[in-house]
Image (tube, helix red, strand yellow):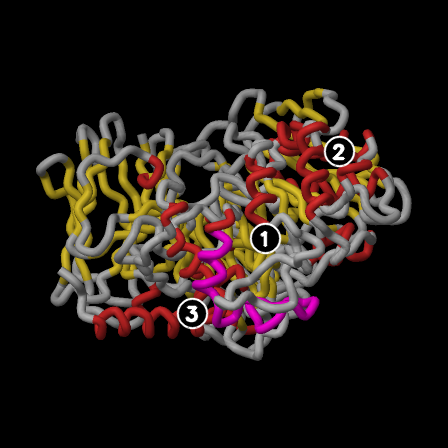
Amino acid sequence: MIRPLGALQRVLTAAATTLAMTAAVSISLAVTVTSPANAAATPQPGPLTAPVMGWNSWNRFGCNIDENLIKATADAMVSTGLRDSGYTYVDIDDCWMAATRDSQGRLQPDPVRFPGGIAAIATYVHARGLKLGIYSSAGTATCQGLPASLDHEVTDAQTWASWGVDLLKYDNCNNQGRPALERYKAMGDALKATGRQIVYSLCNWGNDEPWIFGPNVGGSSWRTTDDINASWGSITSILDQQAGLEPFARKGFYNDPDMLEVGNGSLTQDENIAHFSLWALLSAPLLLGNDLRSVSSATLNILRNPDVIAVNRDWAGSQGRRVADTGDQEVWAKPMSDGSVAVALFNRGGGTATVATTAAALGLGGSSSYSTKNLWTGATATTTGALSASVPSHGVAMYRVTRAGTLSAAPAAGTYQVSDLSWVASSNGWGPVERDRANGEQAAGDGATLNIGGTTFTKGLGTHADSAVHVYLGRACRTFTAQVGVDNEVGANGSVRFQLYGDGKLLAYTGVKTGGQPPTRISASVGGYQNLELRVTDARNNGINYDHADWGSPTLVCGTPGTGSAASDRPWGTATNAWGPAERDMSNGEQAAADGSVITVSGISYPKGVGAHAAADITIPSAGCTRFTAVAGLDAEVAANGTGVTFSVLGDATTLYTSPTVAPGSSILLDVDITGRANIHLVVGSAGSIDYDHADWADARLLC
């Protein structure tokens, strides 16, 4: 059965409206096009398992490229051991193409620079266990004035696929002022239609918030800034612009702060190490930009560091982020899948300085001791929680920190206000975090009544971006709920984003909240986490003035400690869904697998969850588990459309919970006892027509 075109158009229109109103993302619909014969056996495109690693010609060579350089670089990647360290892409940037298209309208290689053609280069590269990347622009010409791909998307994508290209870097020059979403989606659809796995790297310099639209046009990564250059000022400026973008990276979809300049210009050894360490921590694509034909052993020792590369390749639920900033000294951290945290103690000042943090501030509170490993020296040590190092000017000290001692007692069963609990750590942009009052910026207790858009709260936290409150849960709590927003004391000013982290993993985040807006409810499943972090960041990179952010009635429900498990990470039994497959960690895109968007319910986005479409029934084995929790609602991509849905949880054949009809724009927090059930069924029913019934089990989690 094919849905009428009018219904599809209504869904697209609703999604576009949602994108304009909030940080929710628009729906992406797959298009089926016959693939070229030579690509028929190639695996279909899908999310990357880790950011790409490789080399790009632009930073060092600009337009001074030819096929001899590309071949020699491929050979050097093998001989230097870089390929074996994970660097597999050889990317040809601008200036590879001839000044005109051929008689059939196809791009053709410059006959002087690449007389053998790009297909021959691809064959050469592939024979060495490497992959080939190519460049174009979403405009009428490239940045160097050569033919580009605007309105030639299908032809160019098919040409690259026929040559054996594995990655496209797609620039933003000469774009004629046409909407970025339209231009980048056209190429994304064309790449998918080839049937070949071609990584799509968006390079629109951070314009038009590519971290919002990038995943929905097929992008695997998106540039967040203008071009980098081989200077300390450029590197630190770009690093500053990454703060606050961490919610938009997820496994398979990465923020890109541009290519590496390690080994270029007059960067010192300490600067090269800091640059590489921080880009690795950011889960950024690691694309070398130096001359590999004459690379020094000192540079190779940086680029091949296996411990630092492992930080980049590991995904445990969040990219690296800045957790402390005291001026010239900063702390950046990233959770690792083994439960440890990678941390960079960064000194951007002009002289050697001590940079310090604590395990609790890194999200590892609650242990009597910790083990550390220095990722640049290999030295190991133990600590009761303090971590510090003497760091050279423009340098980093980088560690992995792991719990190694006795854990603290978990909270007793009950319902708690976070303002009544002891915190393992807290930090705040101005003054201390306040309990049960707004942030007065100076001394403790100088704030007024918590007031978000005219709604007052007797309990809560008054903070000022950037801020964090760390609470030890001891795996015993199940759900968290709060009403969040900018305090009325700043009027219409301020712009912040609220984020929740469990053991450093991003659980949920809001859109941009500004002064005068009503409160937004943020809820999350926290079962199985040791630590919960309530974080507020500056949302628009415009400074933290007026960023007074309130957590109204932040409530934890706790019970018996257990191990948490995301429903999307567990094996599924039978799964039926009205349109397309039920999706893991994305909304329902109605067509092919993995064609959905970031799950967004009632103004809150969730990296984890199950995206369904009524009528749906998803079976998940649950033996040994005791609770199921989730935030259930219609995805924001359908806006105000639809008649609503019902959510039911069945244990084996018994109905354990059925919701009332959940209307568009609303949500419910589920906390269901599933003790003794071998399987649970997540069932979505419609309250009328199933049009627009994109139903999310956001942050769905089992406590076992």
Q: Is residue 360 left or right of residue 180?
A: right
Q: Are marks 1 and 2 in contact (CB under 8 Å)?
A: no
Q: Which residue is mark 3?
A: 19
Q: Is residue 378 left or right of residue 607?
A: right
Q: Quadrant of residue 628?
A: top left
Report the residue at 88% width, 40% height from top. 352
* 158 within the magenta span: yes
Residue found at the far right of this picture:
351
Magenta segment: 138-161
Q: Residues within 10 Å of mark 1 (few under 14, many from 20)?
A: some
Which quarter of the rendering shows the C terminus?
top left
Return the residue nearer the eye: 360 or 49. 49
Q: Residues within 10 Å of mark 3 (few under 14, many from 20)?
A: some
The label on residue 134 is: 1
Q: Can residue 235 be seen from the camera position used here?
A: no
Q: Is the residue 582 above or below the residue 106 in the image? A: above
Considering the numbered disc 2 on the image, is that residue within a helix, a strand or a loop?
Answer: helix
Considering the numbered disc 1 on the image, is that residue within a helix, a strand or a loop?
Answer: strand
Residue type (three-letter) at the residue carrying disc 1: Ile
Distance (Cα) linking label 3 and label 1: 30 Å
Q: Can residue 20 be seen from the camera position used here?
A: yes
Nearer the observer: mark 3 or 1; the answer is 1
Q: Which residue is mark 2?
A: 302
- Name the chief secondary structure element in magenta: loop
